[in-house]
Image (cartoon, grey):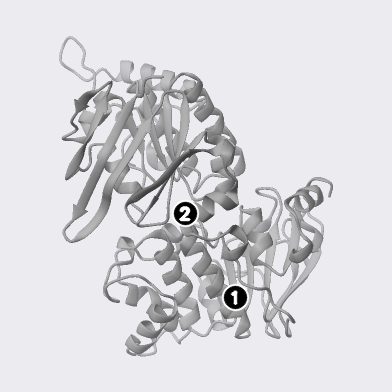
Amino acid sequence: MTNLIRMSNISKAFGGNVALKGVSLELMPGTVHALMGENGAGKSTLMKILAGVHRPDSGELSRNGQKVDFNHPKDALDFGISTVFQELSLLANLTIAENMFLGREPTSRFGRIDYAKMATETTRALNELGLDLDPGTLVSELSIAERQFVEIAHGIKADASIFILDEPTAALNAADVEVLNTNIRRLRDAGKVIVYISHRMDEIFEICDTVTVLKDGELVATQSLSEMTPDSLIAMMVGRELEDLFPERTAQPGDVLLTVENFRINPDSKPFDLVVRRGEIVALAGLEGQGQQKLLRSLVGQHTPAGGTVTIDGRPLRLPVPISTGVRKLQAMGAGFVPEDRKEEGLFLGLSIAHNIAIGLHASRPEMAIAKSCRQVVDATMGSMNVKAANAAVPVGSLSGGNQQKVLLGRYLAANTNLLLIEEPTRGVDIGAKSEIYKLLRDFTAGGGAVLVLSRETIELIGLCDRIYIVHDNTVVDEIHASEATEHKILNAALNA
């Protein structure tokens, strides 16, 4: 079988930092090729060279033995390479059609932009993905999932033969993931190659055929996934097995810190109770969208529950919580909220690490209180959490996903928080950083804190938590000790509620 492209002995350095060292990659038609490695392994740099964003310092790209050069992303797109990076590149103030044809708008015989042709061809590309979207819709009005699919449709419109998907499911729900997987399989069956970058093991083994692993800018191996297990893949990436990622569970939990009683998420949902004790990490599990997130967000004012009582460390939390002051009110009670989308809802990407951590210290103070220097606290927090950055003045937006998540957690740990409410604790985070975050959470509970967490990764909940509440149809239907939990037990409880 002839390859679509071969990257041979690719090396790239940025100043004194060597990002890639002699890496080779061969992409074959009709395959889904996983590219894996910890943050900083060189995945993004390699793909940006393939996409024409960077030029290699040495090595070459070839097809059928003929060398090819990409001096610009447009060269790569013209060659048939379409890239959907984790940070979507669509312009929010333009329509879907305008984005699809940006820079190559068709014109009529009178020299005017042919908007009718743009709309027709955009509709055709969207229909190939099963999308019923108006091409005249502004991108700002689309959901994250819809934007993701529009990016892929853009590649289809360009007749791409190679699709690079960088963390494509990071912001998608289960239904959207299935739609995406259906389209990935369709593209594969049409002879395309999909380079799939993800940190989620279940996705890799479900959708991919082959995996290439990078570590510290070098090639570890390329291997068929049919010959591997999640344990062996993780060991290849970080040198340790899956069970070694999770610290030991709490031997004996302490006093109750969070009490939820007779709680009704919606007017028509059944009431339920739950408790979280000091020293515990407690999970909310179940099928996607069954009320786990609504419960957590009820406590910070982003969902209005139908009834119930909530007590944090013996103090009642008055419901409904005002949306404008919910997070601040929670912090005043010694609790912190870590949202799923850290970039949109959690961090101030343009501000420094120091500012992002210090915000948590100031939020629990009276509004008119004079801000004090928090430098020592910030430095101590960065050190204890192993935040990899030159100094505290570095903008948070320049950090890796794992380090961004540490900064967000550090905001609340620095403020002596007792209770953490966390959505997707390791979303978009590599395996090594996941292990560090798990240890940070265990250290937090070992010091008398408590965590209530939800995650789409069932294996993560089983390995990380002490107890698991199963949520179905906006109510708790079962409780399982994590030491006895399996994916089958959790799914069975969720489906047979």
Amino acid type at mark 2: Met
Label 2 or label 1, whichever lies nearer to me, is 2
In x, y percent, where is residue 108?
Answer: 21, 12
What kind of residue is marked 1?
Arg
Q: Nearer the viewer, residue 125 or 297?
A: 125
Seen in the image, is 337 located left or right of residue 35? right
Number of residue marks: 2
In the image, residue 361 above or below residue 189: below
Dot 1 falls on a residue whose secondary structure is helix
Whether residue 439 is situated above or below residue 471 in the rendered picture:
below
Compared with 12, 377 (above or below) is below
Quarter-of-image position of residue 423:
bottom right
Q: Residue furthest right?
A: 496
Residue at 69 percent across and 60 percent down: it is 462
Q: In front here: 144 or 45?
A: 45
User: Label 2: how many residues lie within 10 Å, few (<14), some (14-19) or many (20+)?
Assistant: many
Q: Which quadrant: the N terminus?
A: top left
Residue 171 image offset from top left, x and y in percent = 50, 48
Where residue 314 sits in the image (x, y, percent)? 71, 86
Q: Residue at x 32, y 89 (%)?
A: 373
Q: Which residue is mark 1?
A: 442
Query: Within the image, what quadrant is residue 215 found in?
Result: bottom left
Q: Which residue is mark 2?
A: 237
Q: Residues within 10 Å of mark 1 (few under 14, many from 20)?
A: many
Element on which disc 2 rests: helix
Q: Residue at x 48, y 21 (%)?
A: 127
